[in-house]
Image (cartoon, rainbow, N blue to C red):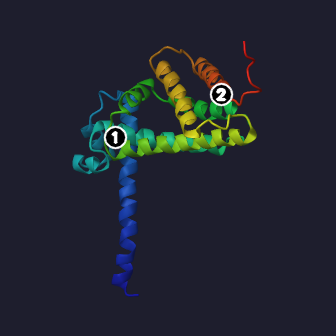
Amino acid sequence: MSKISSKRAAEPGARERNKLDKRDRIAAAAWELFARDGFEATTTAAVAERAGVGKGTLFLYAPDKDDLLMLVMHDRLAERTDRAFATLSARAALPEQLSHVFGSLYELYAEQPRGIGVAFVRLVSTARGPNADRVHAMTQATLSRIASLVRTAQERGDVADDVLPMVAAANLFAAYFFVLFGWLSGLSPTIEILRSHLDAMIALQVRGLAKPHGKPSKG
């Protein structure tokens, strides 16, 4: 292979590394400024300057500040979700498994400035852009993983056969998100109370999903 052809073969890899480097710098700069100055006070111009890129370059990775927030939160949520499922006990009952997964995500929110979580929860349903799309796709993937836990619980006989796993997963995720919203709004002062509220809601839902033991007697 000639030197020219070898150089051309290496160029796509170099370009991809350069793109990833810029993306990482933009994400790191955005996170630093969101955490230090708050989401509302941070400007895309300040993020671009901090990352050492032009505003035009920044907009190639996130078309606006809302999508920039989706970028930084997606990476953190994806990493924490993968870790939670990787450390999940296959032998644990469904409520304990759900508490482990959702509790890990609550801890992520508790570790960062609350204002970032508030902004993310407020914007996630309406945000548009490539990073928002990735967040929505990640949410669907998480629902599928929860549905798999429900399906396994069905196979153990803990959940009724007529329960649709994806419907159950959506209901359980809604409970997680409802409690998260309450905590970010200041209704739950500590993460321990936050988790106890969720555990109670999960227990209630799982009881409703359980396979009935015998038919109720007629009056």
Disc marking residue 206: 2
Residue 63 percent location from the top left of the image: 27, 44
On-image quarter of the N terminus: bottom left
Pointer 2: residues within 10 angstroms few (<14), some, or many (20+)?
some
Going by the numbered disc 2, the residue's amino acid type is Val
Report the residue at 28% width, 51% height from top.
60
Q: Can residue 50 be seen in the rendering of this structure?
A: yes
CA gap between label 1 and label 2 equals 37 Å
Residue 22 percent location from the top left of the image: 35, 53
Which of the marked residues, 1 or 2, is nearer the chain's N terminus? 1
Pointer 1: residues within 10 angstroms few (<14), some, or many (20+)?
many
Compared to residue 15, the image places residue 158 above or below, namely above
What residue is shown with label 1?
Answer: 68
Compared to residue 38, the image places residue 27 above or below, namely below
Disc 1 on helix, strand or loop? helix
125, 163: nearer the viewer: 163
Do the CB atoms of the residues marked 1 and 2 lie less than 8 Å apart?
A: no
Quadrant for residue 30, please give it.
Answer: top left
The residue lying furthest to the front in this view is 219
173, 19: nearer the viewer: 173
Disc 2 on helix, strand or loop? helix
Quadrant for residue 119, please give it.
Answer: top left
